[in-house]
Image (cartoon, helix red, strand yellow):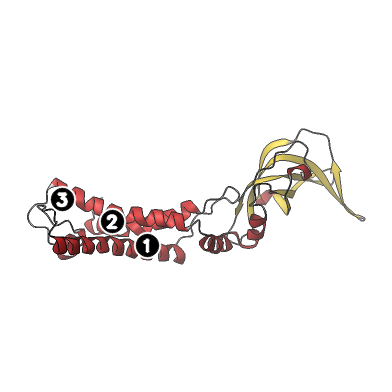
């Protein structure tokens, strides 16, 4: 595959936007909600990348302008054998002669600086209450209320899951602390990871739904996928003493 200078240059110029997108994604990680993959052609991702790139290059060009102004005003200038302004080199082609190794190093560092600034800024901004609420409302959907309730250090979520497995006319069900869950495109639960999990049977009779408990050792960790269960109920507990599973540890997730 031949080298494409145009593609290489486009990636360099988009680096601040890509760094901003990565910073937002890194800052939005949650121990409770598994991060969903980005949708192909996402308008929001495109918006972040394009405007993040513009913001980064505005910052760097502003630094170049400030440096040039300081040089003219004070006469304190560092004489180099090349033009340090990488934008003039790229857009106006003002690199005279054959650039030195130091020139290439200066230009690449200059292009790296706005990416670092935008990426760090996006990561910090993702922790702000306003940005976090907007992001979680879009990511969690209906589950945001439960995430907010389980956010305090003394809170956790218990899930009751009825599966498709049957035993003697009863359905196998699980009850445990929600460690991680993943959502599909419709914000429905696609996967659950439960710890300190209790297994029981659910039998549907004319009188209603009956729970049948059995003696067994709690399951330390179990993963359940949507294709294996038919119903999920969630309940938030705020005190570890109220945990219905004996000996289980309360873990905050948010």
Residue drawn where x is 30% and y is 62% of the image? 59
Residue at the far front in the pictured view: 74
Mark 2 in CB contact with mark 3 (< 8 angstroms): no
Number of the label disc, if any, that sits on residue 77: none
Label 2: element kind: helix
Packing grade of label 3 (10 A; few <14, some 14-19, many >=20) is some
The x, y position of residue 236, in whole percent, is 72, 52
Quarter-wise, where is residue 141 in the image? bottom right
Residue annotated with mark 2: 12
Residue drawn where x is 84% and y is 37% of the image? 214
- The CA span between labels 1 and 2 is 13 Å
Report whether residue 184 is seen.
yes
Mark 3 in CB contact with mark 1 (< 8 angstroms): no
The x, y position of residue 148, in whole percent, is 64, 57
The x, y position of residue 130, in whole percent, is 53, 63
Label 3: element kind: helix
Quarter-wise, where is residue 149 in the image? bottom right
Residue annotated with mark 1: 52
> In the rendered image of this protein, does residue 252 appear above or below residue 10?
above
Report whether residue 42 is seen.
no
Packing grade of label 1 (10 A; few <14, some 14-19, many >=20) is many
- The CA span between labels 3 and 1 is 26 Å
- The CA span between labels 2 and 3 is 16 Å
The x, y position of residue 16, in whole percent, is 34, 57
Mark sitting earlier along the chain (1/2): 2
Residue at the far right in the pictured view: 207
Mark sitting earlier along the chain (2/3): 2
Number of the label disc, if any, that sits on residue 103: 3
Q: Is residue 151 left or right of residue 122?
A: right
């Amino acid at each position: 595959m031949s080298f494409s200078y145009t593609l290489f240059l486009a990636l360099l110029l988009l680096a601040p936007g890509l760094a901003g997108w990565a910073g937002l994604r890194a800052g939005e990680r949650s121990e409770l909600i598994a991060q969903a993959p980005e949708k192909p052609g996402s308008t929001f991702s495109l918006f972040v990348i394009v405007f993040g790139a513009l913001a980064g290059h505005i910052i760097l060009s502003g630094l170049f302008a400030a440096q040039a102004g300081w040089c003219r005003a004070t006469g304190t200038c560092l004489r180099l054998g090349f033009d340090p302004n990488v934008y003039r080199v790229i857009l106006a082609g003002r690199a005279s002669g054959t650039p030195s190794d130091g020139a290439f190093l200066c230009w690449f560092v200059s292009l790296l600086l706005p990416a670092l600034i935008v990426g760090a800024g996006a990561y910090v901004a993702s922790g702000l209450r306003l940005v976090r609420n907007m992001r979680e409302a879009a990511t969690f959907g209906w589950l945001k209320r439960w995430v907010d309730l389980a956010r305090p250090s003394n809170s956790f979520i218990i899930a009751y899951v009825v599966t498709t497995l049957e035993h003697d006319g009863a359905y196998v069900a699980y009850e445990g602390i929600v460690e991680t869950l993943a959502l599909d495109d419709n914000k429905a639960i696609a996967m659950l990871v439960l710890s300190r999990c209790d297994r029981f049977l659910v039998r549907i009779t004319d009188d209603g739904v009956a729970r049948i408990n059995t003696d067994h050792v709690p399951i330390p960790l179990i993963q359940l996928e949507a294709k294996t269960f038919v119903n999920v109920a969630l309940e938030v507990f705020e005190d570890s003493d109220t945990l219905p599973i004996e000996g289980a540890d309360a873990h905050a997730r948010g």
